[in-house]
Amino acid sequence: MGRTVQTYSVMNLSEYKEEKPHYLRRIVWTAVNATLFRILVGRQLRMARNVILRAFGARIPLKSLVYPTCKIWAPWNLEVGHYSCIGPRTQLYNKALIVIGDNAVISQGAFLCTASHDITDSRHSLITAPIAVKDRAWVAADAFIGMGVTIGQGAVVGARAAVFKDVEPWTVVGGNPARVIKRREIKDFS
């Protein structure tokens, strides 16, 4: 059998460069997100928070619920559907677009991350890909959703799961890395 020879180049972060196309906008938004947005507490003030998000470019209906402790990196890269909820202490690191469908829930402490670094590049360059959470999906507490992932319609990501691949519609996943647990079935109690 042939021997595999590995070569290692030196990673030199002194050459790291990242474009900052919305630099001033980010500074203003970071201040607003850490102050005004956070003091508008309670479900009754959700529309005021959504107006602020819209002023910074988010596409969000007024009746969706974004908790005031949610940390959003770039509202202009956020689309939220009707009657959806982004819970307390969530983090949306949306250097690329995050789309959350109708009636979807992102529970407390969840982290949606649209960016990473190219581990094959000696400059460690930034890479991004959008995240989609489809209608009626639920991302449970403290879950991590990686860049480029789509959470299918009606799917459930269990608490503390780490998701790096797409989740099929109406599937329940959990663990790190997330694996299929079962199909999600909705019972009608009417």
Image: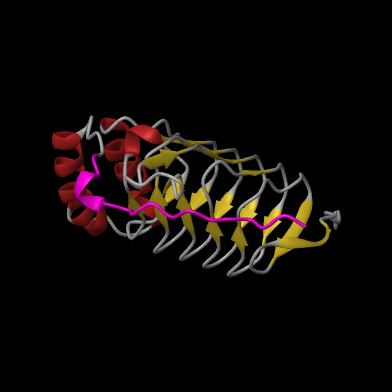
Tell me if 11 is positioned left or right of 136 in this view: left
- Establish if 143 lies above or below 130: below
Image quadrant where one finds the N terminus: bottom right
Residue visible at 51% across and 45% down in the picture? 147
Q: Nearer the viewer, residue 72 or 48?
A: 72
Residue at far front of view? 2
x and y, in percent, of residue 134 in the image = 64, 40
Where residue 142 sits in the image (x, y, percent)?
51, 67
Let me know if residue 7 is in the magenta part.
yes
Instruction: Find residue 190 and report its image quarter.
Output: bottom right
**Residue 59, image x and y in percent?**
41, 30
- Residue 148 placement: quadrant: top right
In this view of the protein, which residue sits in the foreground, 37 or 23?
Answer: 23
Q: Is residue 182 left or right of residue 72?
A: right
Q: Residue at x 31, y 30 (%)?
A: 57
Q: Position of residue 82 (x, y in %)?
A: 54, 37
Q: Nearer the viewer, residue 65 or 113?
A: 113
- 91 or 67: nearer the viewer: 91
Taking 77 as reference, is 156 left or right?
A: right
- The image's colouring method is secondary structure
Whether 178 is drawn above or below 73: the answer is below
- Residue 159 magenta-drawn? no
Q: Start and end of the magenta stretch?
A: 1-17
Provide the major secondary structure of the magenta segment: loop
